[in-house]
């Protein structure tokens, strides 16, 4: 097995940052694909799409939990690393139950495809747990056994018929769990905007932490007990992601907002916001939040975000405080480029049959 960073403490520091970064990137790509294909997530199909994302995040967390921060005492014989090991069989069954449910309810897959997908996921999770994150750690730090794989497959096998039997019995709302494409022209809801902010924060924080860890492994930097290098790297990435990237993109958005197909526009017309307006918004919102988090004051940054979002919650046009001050609006990307979802059914007039003269 190739180990470019070895199996020591340096490799573990890289893994602790890279694993959540990869999970964030996968979540961003998933959301981007859903919005490109189907437009906005609405109603029960939208909730099912987000449930599939939550299920994937839960499986990823289960596969790597507890992701130790150090090798000290990791390989000593003894009981499990955490209290969740005693609930391992129940947890394995419960986490794979939504896999079967969503395969039937959201993705409309048959029982054989569902069972094959659940089996592959169960073996993949067990391999990650049983090999110490594919050999990054010197020994396995979480329980893995054929029993856990079998329980994961069983959970998938039970979830599929449950969805088929119970969903049609819903006494309220629609029983359709798969999405239908709609034009993405209405104001984005708070859930979509919150996901965009979370993706931006995770990409920035874990991206900077991973970069510092890799620099330490390859010898570019030495020991940094006070975290000065990480703070400098985080501030540099904040300038790239929050200042320069929006100026270069047509939608004037950061990577997280672009992942859910959002855009910053002028207040009175569906055109990209001017660069001075975007810079003013960055100076009032993005820069203070980055500085507060980088210097260890995340709760103040959260309070700043709550103040900004309070207006978006109560106003019918969902405009935040900083957007009101800077003359910008958070709208969908489809408003400025006129794009339509790729799965949208479009009417085409039938062609007249060609007749001989």
Image (cartoon, rainbow, N blue to C red):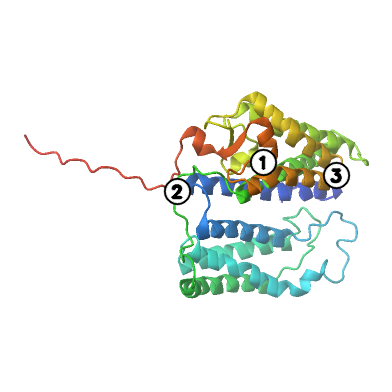
* Dot in front, 1 or 3: 1
Q: Position of residue 215 (x, y in %)?
A: 81, 37
Which residue is rendered at x = 65% and y = 67% of the image?
A: 95
Classify residue 101 as left or right of residue 275. left
Mark 1 → mark 3, Cα distance in angstroms? 22 Å
Answer with the quarter of the image where residue 281 lies: top right
Q: Which residue is drawn at 49% across and 69% down?
A: 172
Q: Earlier in the sequence, mark 1 or mark 2?
A: 2
Q: Is residue 109 above or below residue 214?
A: below
Count neighbours of disc 3 (C-alpha within 10 A) and say few if under 14, some if 14 to 19, many if 20 or more.
Answer: few
Is residue 219 in sight in this rendering?
A: no
Foreground of the two, 338 or 327: 327
93 on left or right of 77: left
- Residue at image coords 64%, 72%: 93
Crowding at mark 1 (Cα within 10 Å: few <14, some 14-19, many 20+): many
Q: Would you call the spot at circle 2 few (<14 residues within 10 Å), some (14-19), or many (20 or more)?
A: some
Please tell me whether mark 1 or mark 2 is closer to you in this view.
1
Farthest residue in the front direction?
315
* Residue contact at pointers 1 and 3, CB within 8 angstroms: no
Task: Find residue 163 and report its horizontal and vertical position in percent.
Answer: 51, 71
Q: Spot the residue most to the right.
A: 225
Q: Which residue is drawn at 8% across and 37% down?
A: 356
Which residue is under mark 3?
A: 297
Q: Name the residue under label 2.
A: 182
Q: Which residue lies furthest to the left in this view?
A: 357
Secondary structure found at label 1? loop
Residue that numbered label 1 is attached to = 320
Q: Is residue 259 visible?
A: yes
Image: 65 above or below 186:
below
């Amino acid at each position: 097995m190739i180990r470019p960073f070895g199996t020591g403490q340096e490799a573990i520091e890289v893994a602790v940052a890279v694993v959540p970064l990869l999970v964030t990137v996968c979540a961003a790509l998933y959301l981007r694909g859903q919005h490109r294909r189907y437009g906005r997530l609405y109603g029960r199909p939208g909730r099912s799409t987000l449930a599939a994302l939550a299920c994937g995040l839960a499986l990823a967390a289960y596969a790597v939990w507890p992701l130790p921060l150090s090798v000290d005492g990791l390989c000593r014989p003894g009981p499990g690393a955490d209290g969740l090991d005693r609930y391992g069989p129940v947890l394995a069954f419960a986490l794979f139950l939504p896999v079967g449910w969503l395969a039937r309810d959201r993705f409309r897959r048959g029982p054989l495809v569902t069972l094959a997908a659940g089996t592959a996921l169960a073996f993949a999770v067990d391999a990650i747990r049983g090999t110490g994150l594919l050999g990054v750690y010197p020994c396995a730090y979480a329980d893995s056994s054929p029993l856990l794989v079998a329980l994961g497959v069983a959970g998938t096998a039970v979830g599929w018929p449950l969805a088929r039997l119970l969903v049609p019995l819903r006494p309220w709302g629609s029983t359709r769990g798969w999405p239908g494409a709609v034009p993405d022209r209405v104001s984005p809801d708070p859930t979509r905007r919150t996901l965009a902010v979370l993706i931006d924060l995770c990409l920035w924080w874990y991206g900077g932490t991973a970069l510092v860890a890799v620099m330490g492994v390859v010898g570019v930097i030495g020991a940094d007990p006070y975290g000065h290098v990480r703070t400098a790297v985080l501030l540099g990435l904040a300038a790239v992601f929050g200042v320069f990237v929006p100026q270069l993109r047509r939608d004037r958005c950061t990577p997280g907002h672009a992942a859910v197909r959002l855009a910053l526009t002028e207040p009175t017309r569906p055109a990209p916001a001017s660069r001075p307006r975007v810079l003013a918004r960055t100076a009032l919102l993005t820069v203070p939040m980055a500085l507060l988090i980088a210097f260890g004051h995340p709760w103040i940054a959260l309070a700043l975000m709550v103040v900004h979002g309070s207006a978006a919650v109560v106003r019918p046009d969902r405009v935040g405080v900083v957007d009101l001050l800077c003359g910008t609006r958070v709208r969908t990307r489809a408003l400025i480029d006129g794009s339509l979802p790729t799965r949208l059914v479009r009417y085409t007039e039938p062609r007249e049959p060609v007749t001989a003269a």
